[in-house]
Every structure is written in C-alpha cells, then in structure tokens.
C-alpha cells in the first residue's frame, strides 16, 4: 500500500487491531472472502514509497489457492459519509464536472462537483453536494439548468456497497429525482 494512503487512513492501526480485509478472486463479482490484517512491516520501501502489509484468510473455500491473483480491500476504522450519485447523473462541459440539482421550485440548477472513485454504477462526490440535495438522477442529457421539472423521487440502490471501499470509508444513501 502506498505510504500516503496508509498514513491518512490506517495510521493508527497495528497488526493486533484485527482490521477486516476483503478479498475478490479474479473472475469473482464481489469481495466474498473475509480475513484480518496480521502483519505490518516496520519500514517503508524507499524505492517504491509503499508499506508491506499481510492479511490472513481462513481456507474455507477451495477457490483460495497460494499464488492466485486477487484484489484486496481494507476496511478503515474511521467512517466518513460521502454523497453517492448515479454515474448517469454527472455531466461534463469544457471546464467542470457537474450535476443538476432540483431546487424548492422544482427548477434545475447547475452544480459543479468534484468526483471521487466509482463504485459500480455510482460515483462518490467529494465536494459540491450535500446529502440534502435533490439531484436529477437521469442526468443532463435530456434537460438543462433553469428548466422546470416534475420530479419523481427514486431511491438509489446501495446494497452492493461493501464496508471496504478504496480510500473512502462508508457511503451514505442518496436519493435522486427521475
């Protein structure tokens, strides 16, 4: 793991902390195997700027084999709420990434946003929105700022989000407008 991510997110973790680790084998759809962090190297590799860590997994599945390729996610100990929006709700122009919000008069408003990482069909918004904002979930393809709309509330499915997302901690549910 790179040193910056470790220091920002996991700096207070020790090998005895029993930090959950999730593993996804090549070809799997989800991170279905859970283990725990059991080793943290005592030095950063000066050539790569990375810290070596190790996780232990119970061999409860015949799929787990030594040397197999896998993706691993660590679950940070500090939860942080983020706003999630459907990827289709995000527009782009020459200068900004943006979403359209619905104001109290049911009029669309342009809102520049800063994007975080992608989680399936959802995108983390790191700045520009609050969890109280109503967004045009179907995005700017059919509508534009200043247009009046007759919104229909839709609930965004966040059931596929695990507790261990890369570099952010947990996500808040966000509702959008259709």
Image: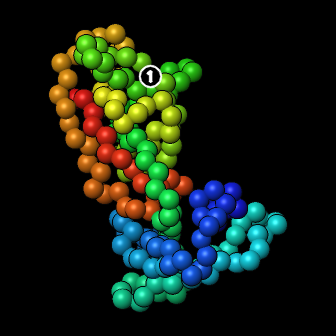
When the figure is inspected, residue 172 is found, relative to residue 153, above or below; the finding is below
- Describe residue 143's horizontal placement relative to residue 50 as left or right: left
In which quadrant is the C terminus drawn? top left
State the colouring used for the structure image: rainbow
Q: Indicate the quadrant where residue 28 lies.
A: bottom left
Instruction: Kindly identify which residue carries mark 1.
Output: 111
Q: Position of residue 123 (x, y in %)?
A: 42, 42
Name the secondary structure under disc 1: strand
Residue 59 sits in quarter: bottom left
| Front-lying residue, 22 or 39 | 39
Q: Nearer the viewer, residue 59 or 164?
A: 164
Residue at figure coordinates x 42%, y 54% from the top left: 170
Q: Quadrant of the N terminus?
A: bottom right
Residue 146 seen by the camera: yes
Task: Please rate how many residues cluster around mark 1, counting C-alpha atoms within 10 Å: few if below 14, some from 14 to 19, many from 20.
Answer: some
Q: Position of residue 131 (x, y in %)?
A: 36, 36
What is the total number of numbered labels drawn onto the structure image? 1
Residue at image x 51%, y 63%?
76
Q: Position of residue 153 (x, y in %)?
A: 19, 32
**Residue at horizontal 37 percent and vertical 13 percent from the top:** 145
Residue in the picture at 76% in, 69% down: 44
Residue 70 visible in rendering: no
Give percent across and percent down for residue 54. Answer: 59, 79
Q: Is residue 176 left or right of residue 20?
A: left
Tell me if residue 171 comes above or below residue 41 in the rendering: above
Most extreme residue toward the right, as rendered?
Answer: 46
Question: Which residue occupies the foreground of this view, 175 or 23?
Answer: 175
């Amino acid at each position: 793991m790179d040193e910056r991510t470790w220091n920002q997110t996991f700096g207070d973790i020790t090998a005895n902390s029993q930090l959950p680790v999730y593993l996804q084998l090549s070809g799997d759809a989800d991170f279905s195997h859970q283990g725990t962090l059991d080793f943290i190297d005592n030095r950063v590799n000066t050539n790569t700027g990375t810290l070596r860590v190790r996780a232990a997994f119970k061999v409860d599945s015949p799929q787990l084999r030594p040397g197999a390729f896998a993706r691993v996610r660590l679950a940070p100990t500090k939860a942080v709420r983020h706003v999630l929006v459907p990827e289709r709700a995000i527009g782009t122009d020459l200068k900004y990434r943006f979403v359209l919000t619905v104001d109290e008069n049911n009029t669309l408003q342009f809102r520049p946003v800063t994007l975080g990482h992608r989680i399936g069909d959802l995108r983390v918004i790191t700045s520009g929105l609050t969890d109280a904002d109503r967004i045009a979930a179907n995005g700017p393809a059919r509508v534009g700022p200043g247009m009046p709309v007759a919104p229909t509330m839709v609930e965004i499915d966040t059931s596929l989000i695990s507790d261990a997302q890369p570099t952010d901690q947990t996500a808040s549910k966000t509702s959008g407008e259709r």
